[in-house]
Every structure is written in C-alpha cells, then in structure tokens.
Amino acid sequence: MDIFLQQILNGLVQGSVYALVALGYTMVYGILGLINFAHGEVVMVGAMVALTVSQLLLATGLPPLLVLLIALMVAAAACMVLGYGIERIAYRPLRNAPRLAPLITAIGVSIVLQNLAMIFWGREYHAFPQLLPNGLHTLGGAVINDVQLIIMLVALLMMTGLMLLVHRTRLGRAMRAVAENPSAAMLMGVDINRVISVTFMLGSALAAVAGIMVSANYGIVHYYMGSILGLKAFTAAVLGGIGNLRGAMLGGVLLGLIESLGAGYIGDLSGGFFGSNYQDVFAFFVLIAVLIFRPSGLLGERVAERA
Amino acid sequence: MNLLEIENLKVSYGGIQALKGISFTVAPGELVALIGSNGAGKTTTLKTLAGLLHPAAGKIHYNGISLHNIPAHQRVHNGLALVPEGRGIFARLTVAENLLMGAYTRNDATHIGADLDRMYALFPRLNERRTQLAGTLSGGEQQMVAMARALMCRPKLLMLDEPSMGLAPMMVAKIFETIRNISEQGVSILLVEQNAKLALEVAQRGYVLESGLVTLSNSAEDLLGSDEVRRAYLGA
C-alpha cells in the first residue's frame, strides 16, 4: 500500500469538507466583516437533522439512496432557516455596533446551539446509518471507498455551482457589490438585508451538506462535532485569505492535505514520540503560522475576486 | 407639476444640524444646480433624497409621492438615481458588471442590452474597457462608469454629487459635456458642485446653500451675473 498516495487521498476528502465549511465563513466575512463562529454548529445541526430524518425514513423501508437525498434536502432546508434566523435575531440588531459585539454574540450563538442540540439529541454519540454503497477501490496502491469518492464529487459540484452563482448571476453580482460597498449597492436598488440573508442561507446549505459528508464518512454524529470542525474550517478560510471564495476552497484542500500528511508521517519523523493522534494540532500550527507570516492569507484581500 | 418638491427639510447627524430647513424644486426635464462651499449641506441634501440619511423634519415629494419611509433601494425603483461623491464604483467588478449593477432594478434583458450599447456609445472609453476591473480605471473613467451606471436604471431624476472632483480639466470638460447631453435627452438633473461657474453654465436654475440654508435662488444666468455669487464662489 502506498502510504503517501493514501494520505493524499484522505487529505483531499477531508479537505473537501473543510472547503465547503470554509466557504460559509468566508462568504459571511466578505459581506459583513463578521466571523460567524456559530457556523460550525450549523454543520452539526445539519448532521443531526439528517440523522433524525434518515432514522425515521429507514424505518418506513424506503431505499437508502432515496433516504439520503430526502435527508440532505431536509437538512439543507433546516440549516437555511437556521442561518437566516441566526442573522436576523443575533447579528442584524448589531449591524452598526462595534465589531467585538457581534463576535461575542457569535460565540454565544454557538454555545446556545450546542446546548439546544444536546437537550434535543442527547449527549451520546449516535451511529449515522450507512446510506451509500461502501465498495472499496484501489487506486495506484491506495484505497478509497465510494463514500469518499462521492464526498469529493459532491464538494466539487457544490463549489462549481457556487462560483457560477457568484460570478455569473445577477444575485452573485449583487453579493459582490454589497461585499465591496454596501451603500453604493443600495443606490443601485439592492435590498442589502435580503442579500445578506441569502448569503447566510447559502453558506448554511453548504454547511448542511458538509455535515452529512462528515457523518457519512465517519459514521458518527455528536452534538459537539461542529466545534472543532468549525475552528478548522475557519483556519482554512484564514489560510486562503478570509473574504476570498477561491481562498476558502484552496485553504480547505490544503489544510486537509497538511493534516493528513502530517498525521501520516509525524510518527516516523519524531521517531515514534508523536502519533497520528496529534492530527488536530497541525491545523492550529497552520493558523498561528499564517497569522504571523501572512495575515492576509494565501490569496489575501488585495488580489481578491480578480475575474 | 414639479418632479421634486422639498419643503423645510431638516437633517441632523452626529448632533449637528446639517440642514436647517431648506426648500427647493426641480421641474421635469430641468437641470438644477446646488452650489455652495464645503460643509454647506449639499451632499447631505443628496444623501437624504437618496434615502441614505433620514430627515428630522420636512417633506420630500417626488413624482407625486412622499418619499417618507421609502427605503433607499426602493427609491431607485422609482427612477431616483444618485451618483455619490467619490463615485462609489465597485472596484472589484468589471466595467460591464458595474453597468449591469446599475440595471439591477430592471429585468427586461433585451432593453438592458440596448441601453448598455447606448452607454458604450456615450462613453467610448468604457467600451474599450468593458472587461477591465473598474478599480484599475483612471479617475475620469471611474466618473464615467458611475454616471453610466446611474443612467442604466433609466432615472427620471439623476443626482450628481461633485462630478468634477479630483479630475483633470480636460476630463472635467468632457464630463460636463456629457451632463449637458444627458439633460438634453430629457433626464431631470440635480447637480451639486463646488465649482459654481461650471455648474451654473450648464444649469437652468440654481440654489445657493450656506450653512444648511438656501440663501439665494434664481435662474442660473442671473446667479452667474450676481455680485454675491461672483464674490463668494467665482473668485471674481
């Protein structure tokens, strides 16, 4: 088995998930200058809703693939409502407040959502049902399963769709205009509040998809799962240059690769002193390094959105 | 009937009363200039009309309706367009995308296309730079983008805030020629300028604003000839 290739594949799969979540952070940051720390929790809610829906539907004997599709749609819809609600209730009243206020509010929303999920779904780990075929494929000495292939494919589709939306449609143009100059956008007849709501809803729908991907990949769902995933996706967004869509995608994939290769080789490199359980450390090393050496990220603000 | 009627408009911000009760009108097809020194309240007036600032008192009637409680983005739907001070172009959008933003309130694709062509004919420079990011353009070209963009919503009343600001004299002449051109096509224009001479030369009527009050109003010709205006604003 080729360990290097295997780690690359694992990294790409994990990176696809990070990229989808990072897009949510970066879209909101681009348009409001706000870091929506509750975004990781939206991923968790997406996973939880999908879990409940699929448990209910599997009991009725529907085919697993159909169950997955319905669960996906229900979770995406639920997260869109949630994202809309978070902005409407928690952030909009603070639109003109000092930047620290919405940031603290975001952390508050995150805690509230975690606790609500804990009350509703309990503290225990839930097994996420296997809804996809789980065939294994060998690829040049590495192994990849169907779920992982589908994760990469779906992530690619979602990202392509988002890029087309942002760069080729009237709504996308309005989003970019609001991100750059809200009052000028208003003078063009753009309803800023509507564009902001739509942005939150789009980001939340991507989060729901990411939540289902993680659940399907690991087979486990937990009320706390959004916390670390959210922080890592935020790191990915910062790595790519927060506010920049391409940056979020690049940062996500890079972070996935760094983590995976790091976890794969840290044991050999440290003579067995560190193990792959140090995987989570890499993300935060990356965050610190970026903040020190290149605070604007790889595709930093200045070159953002060049067509 | 007047297209725009302003009565006793008062606006404060940051505890300072910027407009202390001004009244003026713009008739359909008219080009009206608001002149006055820095801090007289000219920009405040336009921002209030566009809905970016909210009046403390007074009435704004536009095209037969009261603009009270109509949000800024809705006013554009009614054909009220502002080219803001400093232009407010979208630097990271292309020239063509900027113009399309101007047509945001419209959904008649074929007419939008025709209007785009008209804008490129009116500003041939922009035609050459369609796919360029607007932020890479010169100041004069950016002013052209801002004006063309505002025209893309097919305004009934076009408000221009300091279109000459920061531009080279040749570019200023070109911009004012275009303003005259737009006016001749029947668009009503409310022009705010520090360069009083230029503004009064293209306008039919003018109002002089001083510390938040209208101190003089007359035909542009008479204002150009009046000693007061000459002394205060024309440096003669």
Image: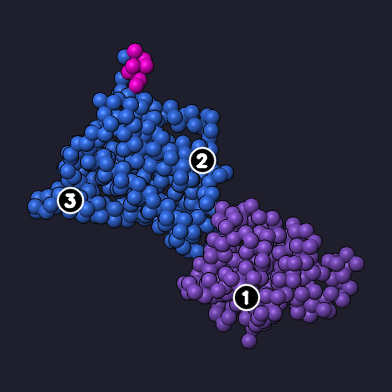
Chain colours: A blue, B purple
Give the number of the disc on residue A65: 3
| Rendered position, A128 above or below B195 | above
Question: Per the image, is B194 magenta?
Answer: no
Distance from Cα at disc 3 to Cα at disc 1? 57 Å
* Whether marks 2 and 1 lie on the same chain: no
Q: Where does residue A2 sit, x and y in percent of width and height?
A: 29, 26
Specify whether disc 3 shares its chain with disc 1: no
Chain under disc 2: A
Alpha-carbon distance for marks 3 and 2? Answer: 38 Å
User: What residue is pinned by disc 2?
Assistant: A299
At mark 3, the secondary structure is helix
Highlighted magenta segment, given as a residue range: A265-271
Chain letter of mark 3 equals: A
> Farthest residue toward the bottom?
B1
* Cβ atoms at labels 3 and 2 below 8 Å apart: no
Quick check: can you spot residue B206? no
* Residue nearest the viewer, comparing B99 with B125: B125
User: Badge 1 is on which residue?
Assistant: B157
Q: Is residue B199 above or below residue A106?
A: below
Question: What residue is drawn where x is 34% and y is 21%?
Answer: A265
Tell me the residue at 48%/28% (across/down): A289
Callout 2: SS: loop
Q: Main secondary structure of the magenta part?
A: helix
Tell me the distance, in whole angstroms, between the alpha carbons under discs 2 and 1.
Answer: 41 Å
Chain ID at mark 1: B
Q: Amino acid at mark 2?
A: Leu
The x and y percentages for residue A187 are 56, 65
